Image (cartoon, grey):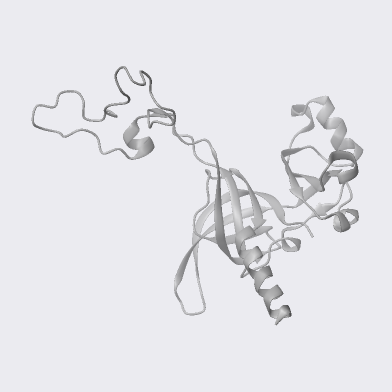
Amino acid sequence: MIQAILGKKVGMTEVFDAKGQVIPVTVIEAGPCVVIQQKTKENDGYDAIQLGFDTKKEKNTVKPILSKFKKINSVPRRFVREVEVSGEDMATFTPGKEVMVEEVIKPETFVDVIGITKGRGFTGVMKRHGFTGSPGSHGTHEYFRHGGSLGQHSDPSRVYKNVGMAGQYGNSQVTIQNLKVIKVTPEDHCIYIQGAIPGPISGYVIVRQAIKKRNKNISKDTQRKNE
């Protein structure tokens, strides 16, 4: 079956469990997503489907993209990504079909959330890399937040790669793994996930079934069968 769904971050809140303990959760509006295109091993070298999420006005869509959506009798979508699907399940996800959140994500399971972090612009080494900076006394002048020495003299006469310097911080793809799904509300198309996820409010994310937790459970089931 399909392993992931597209959505956007609504915000954070808190819920209470059966013991009355407070659980901080992030609410994600996931789906309904429309299947735009199928990718097969015969034509593309791999099996996947292209999903679209969040409707968009036709007047704001370029004609080549608009024609692609008209072929499947659907309105244009803002967020389009490919999702892996096994070959035997490909016939289930025909172009134009809508994928709902309850078909992909179940409560009390674990998921990985992929998103784009908040962009923080051009920042110094203290904010970007956590440098401590120079001492604030004993004759230090205008050097409190600098990065310090960067390289050597005549050998090698250059700065090594990946040295921590000032630069753009944030605005990069991040995956938060093994987050627990507290509940799923199909009527609102929402997922309540314990903890925080990357990105701002209304930022688009991909919610997929946790790879590590899933593989761990599969290996346990295989071990039980062998026993």
In this rendering, would 48 be left or right of 180?
A: right
In this rendering, would 225 be left or right of 114?
A: right
Q: Position of residue 40 (x, y in %)?
A: 87, 45
In this rendering, would 197 be left or right of 4?
A: left
Q: Which residue occupies 83% across, 31% down?
A: 66
- The N terminus sits in image quarter: bottom right
Residue 5 visible? The answer is yes
Q: Is residue 37 above or below residue 102?
A: above
In this rendering, would 174 be left or right of 101?
A: left
Q: Position of residue 17 (x, y in %)?
A: 51, 74
Q: Is residue 221 above or below residue 59?
A: below
Q: Is residue 153 above or below residue 97?
A: above
Q: Quadrant of residue 103?
A: bottom right
Q: Which residue occupies 36% across, 21% down?
A: 156
Q: Is residue 224 above or below residue 107?
A: below
Residue 40 visible? The answer is no
Q: Position of residue 6 (x, y in %)?
A: 69, 49
Q: Position of residue 5 (x, y in %)?
A: 71, 52
Q: Quadrant of residue 191?
A: bottom right
Q: Between 227 and 31, which is closer to the camera in this rendering?
A: 227
State the residue lying farthest toward the bottom.
Answer: 227
